[in-house]
Amino acid sequence: MTLPFFVLMAGLMGAAGVALAATAAHAAPGAGLDSAAQILLVHAVALLAGSAAVAAGLTWRPIAIAALMGFVLGALLFAGDVTLRAFVGHRLFPMAAPTGGSILILSWIALSVAAAVRLVRS
């Protein structure tokens, strides 16, 4: 994956996060959409910051790219599952939201490892 892909995904995730936040506040209060919005918004910014860190050479690229992919996949699984349950009453698949959350946790650790490897190699 190239860095512009992650910037593209950050924009889409940010837009979806704002839309879900508005929906949570006005159309579906109490449906859990606020947590989906928060995950999308936080990880949209994380994608931008992570992409900038890769571009600046602050991380070891292979691990950092895997972490950025994990941010995309984890946020989409979590937010997608919560959103689908709120609007349709069905899940993506059993344990989709917790799986997405676990991927996000591992991705943050991977980003830290990517920075640590870069530190050791400098």
Image (cartoon, helix red, strand yellow):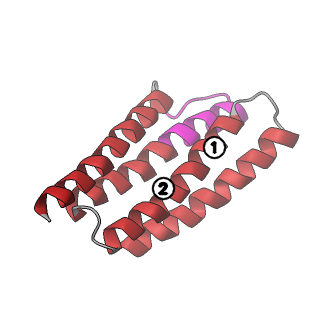
- State if disc 1 and disc 2 touch (CB < 8 Å): no
> Residue 116 placed where, x, y %?
22, 52
> Residue 5 placed where, x, y %?
42, 70
74 in magenta: no
Mark 1: few/some/many CA within 10 Å (<14, 14-19, 20+)? some
Amino acid at dot 1: Gln
- The magenta stretch is 77-92
Examine the rendered structure and indicate whether residue 120 appears above or below residue 31.
below
What residue is shown with label 2? Answer: 46
What residue lies at 64% left-to-right and 31% top-to-bottom? 85
Say whether disc 2 or disc 1 marks the residue closer to the N-terminus: 1
> Residue 88 placed where, x, y %?
68, 34
Mark carried by residue 38: 1
Examine the rendered structure and indicate whether residue 1 appears above or below residue 81.
below
Q: Secondary structure at mark 2?
A: helix
| Residue 2 in view in this figure | no
Mark 2: few/some/many CA within 10 Å (<14, 14-19, 20+)? some
Residue at the limit of the structure toward the left, as seen here: 121
